[in-house]
Image: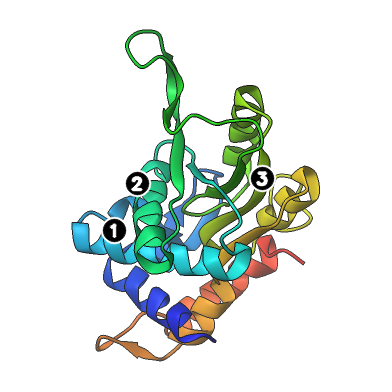
Amino acid sequence: MEQYKQEFIEFMVECRVLKFGDFTLKSGRKSPFFMNAGAYVTGAQLQKLGRFYARAIHERYGDDFDVLFGPAYKGIPLSVATCIAYSELYGKEIRYCSNRKEVKDHGDTGILLGSRLQDGDRVVLIEDVTTSGKSIEETWPILRAQADVEIRGLMVSLNRQEVGLEGKVSALQEIQDKYGFPADAIVSMSEVTEYLYNRPCRGEIYIDDTIKNAIDRYYEQYGAK
């Protein structure tokens, strides 16, 4: 596993973004782990997070794109932080764009925040985590209504590696199959489990035998083939 992935796993745990225990997800599934990118709250955390995303996007999609689009709401700080990091790390000026939940009818009108989308723009989507693919289903028509853009791919923090809306393959694979663009993650849950299982992280074991067994049972029920 690449060094930056190991560092990112430790970073998620240290920031209490990735937790282990007993959680009920938006989908209704009972999960032994939970990720919440809203727990990145300081300037230093967001700066570091942007750099992890920028590196993963650079390795997966290169520099051949114009806009980072982060769906509201959590995608807004992700896209901003990553655009800043991209400029710092690679000297490439990427525009950020996001959507509003409601269309604004006064002042800076419309449904978009940040850069306007233009015909021919090459766009990378950025999200925290994709469990069912529902957010992309909501984002897709918004993008298509604004301009004739090319989606270069999607990058999320964590690939949960569980079945999506159709209940057959992972949410990331469903997105790839349905929309025709690649979908990737900084790390996968299998990489997280492999790295943290019975390994101290800042003096604490986060995945012991009990948590590991719960994760295994979860994937027996919801894991993508």
Which quarter of the figure has residue 165? top right
Q: How is the image coloured?
A: rainbow
Report, in whole angstroms, how far the alpha carbon at label 2 lies from the one at label 1. 8 Å
As helix, strand or loop, the secondary structure at mark 1 comes to: helix
Residue 202 location, x and y as percent?
Answer: 25, 85
Q: Which mark is residue 46?
A: 1
Given contact means CB atoms under 8 Å apart, are the residues at marks 2 and 1 in contact? yes
Which comes before the other along the chain, label 2 or label 1? Answer: 1
Report, in whole angstroms, how far the alpha carbon at label 3 lies from the one at label 2. 20 Å
> Which residue: 44% across, 25% down?
101
**Disc 2: which residue:** 77
The residue nearer to you, when weighing 140 against 188, is 140
Q: Residue 50: in sight, yes or no? A: yes
- Near mark 3 (Cα within 10 A), the count class, few <14, some 14-19 or many ≥20, is many
Of the residues shown, which amino acid type is indicated by label 2?
Pro
Left or right: 202, with 119 as reference point = left
Given contact means CB atoms under 8 Å apart, are the residues at marks 3 and 2 in contact? no
**Disc 3: which residue:** 151
Q: Is residue 61 above or below residue 174?
A: below
Report, in whole angstroms, how far the alpha carbon at label 3 lies from the one at label 1. 25 Å
